[in-house]
Image (cartoon, rainbow, N blue to C red):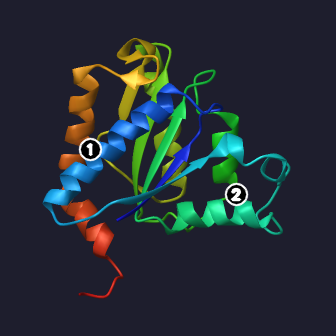
């Protein structure tokens, strides 16, 4: 399974990246039972630079930006992860999806993940992220995952409740993800 991670965090070491690491390890473990190997690529929007921030439309973007957009569009599963800023996803995260083709994510499974300062930020999953991917006609996974600052020691996720939610999110749709990993590929 080709997994594309779009990381909306504005920094290299972040709670969001820590949460994504746990999601990827859990996904790899659960899908291995179904005979599916996971390959992932992570797109850190803050690393895309001035060629990205200055882009107003997809046409004519720099080759490295086009490559990042294609990796997200061509993934079998997209993990959309962002910290909460001012009650929503980060601006660079939104800008990335402003450049994604309107139909490229249709019917694509999307795992929603977010981090924030406190539990009151958890609403970002339902009030900001689901509507964004609803626009794209994506198939957001039923269980989304939020972790607050208190769930971490630095960037390491500690809280068993969050680990359990990640496991539930992946295990509940493991059959759908297995199908998504093999869709459109020749049989061995």
Q: Give the SS element for disc 1.
A: helix
Mark 2 and mark 1: Cα distance apart in space: 30 Å
Quarter of the picture containing the C terminus is bottom left
The tag earlier along the polypeptide, 2 or 1, is: 1
Q: Position of residue 55 (x, y in %)?
A: 82, 54
Q: Residue at x 51, y 69 (%)?
A: 74
Q: Which mark is residue 170?
A: none
In this view, the mark in front (2 or 1): 1
Q: Give the SS element for disc 2.
A: helix
Q: Residue at x 60, y 67 (%)?
A: 70
Please indicate, yes or no, whether residue 125 appears anywhere in the rendered image: no
Residue 164 in the figure: left or right of residue 17: left
Quarter of the picture containing the N terminus is bottom left
Q: Residues within 10 Å of mark 1 (few under 14, many from 20)?
A: some
Residue 72 in the figure: left or right of residue 182: right
Residue 146 in the figure: left or right of residue 117: left
Location of mark 1 (residue):
26
Q: Position of residue 148 (x, y in %)?
A: 42, 18
Q: Position of residue 93 (x, y in %)?
A: 63, 42
Q: Are marks 2 and 1 in contact (CB under 8 Å)?
A: no
Q: Position of residue 105 (x, y in %)?
A: 50, 63
Q: Residue at x 76, y 67 (%)?
A: 63
Residue most toward the left?
A: 33
Q: Which mark is residue 99?
A: 2
Q: Quadrant of residue 68?
A: bottom right
Residue 9 in the figure: left or right of residue 60: left
42 or 85, nearer to the observer: 42
Q: Residues within 10 Å of mark 2 (few under 14, many from 20)?
A: some
Q: Quadrant of residue 87?
A: top right
Picture layout, residue 20 above or below residue 51: above
């Amino acid at each position: 399974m080709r997994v594309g991670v779009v990381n909306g965090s504005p920094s290299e070491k972040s709670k969001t990246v820590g949460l994504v690491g746990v999601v990827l390890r859990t996904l790899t473990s659960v899908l291995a039972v179904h005979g599916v190997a996971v390959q992932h690529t992570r797109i850190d929007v803050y690393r895309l630079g001035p060629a990205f921030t200055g882009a107003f439309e997809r046409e004519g973007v720099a080759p490295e930006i086009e490559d990042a957009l294609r990796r997200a569009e061509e993934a079998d599963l997209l993990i959309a992860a962002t910290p909460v800023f001012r009650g929503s996803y980060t601006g660079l995260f939104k800008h990335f999806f402003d450049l994604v083709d309107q139909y490229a994510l249709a019917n694509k499974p999307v795992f929603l993940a977010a981090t924030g300062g406190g539990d009151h930020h958890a609403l970002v999953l339902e009030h900001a992220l689901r509507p964004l991917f609803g626009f794209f006609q994506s198939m957001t996974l039923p269980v989304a995952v939020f972790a607050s600052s208190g769930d971490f020691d630095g960037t390491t996720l500690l809280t068993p409740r969050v680990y359990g939610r990640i496991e539930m999110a992946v295990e509940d749709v493991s059959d759908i993800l297995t199908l998504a990993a093999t869709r459109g590929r020749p049989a061995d």
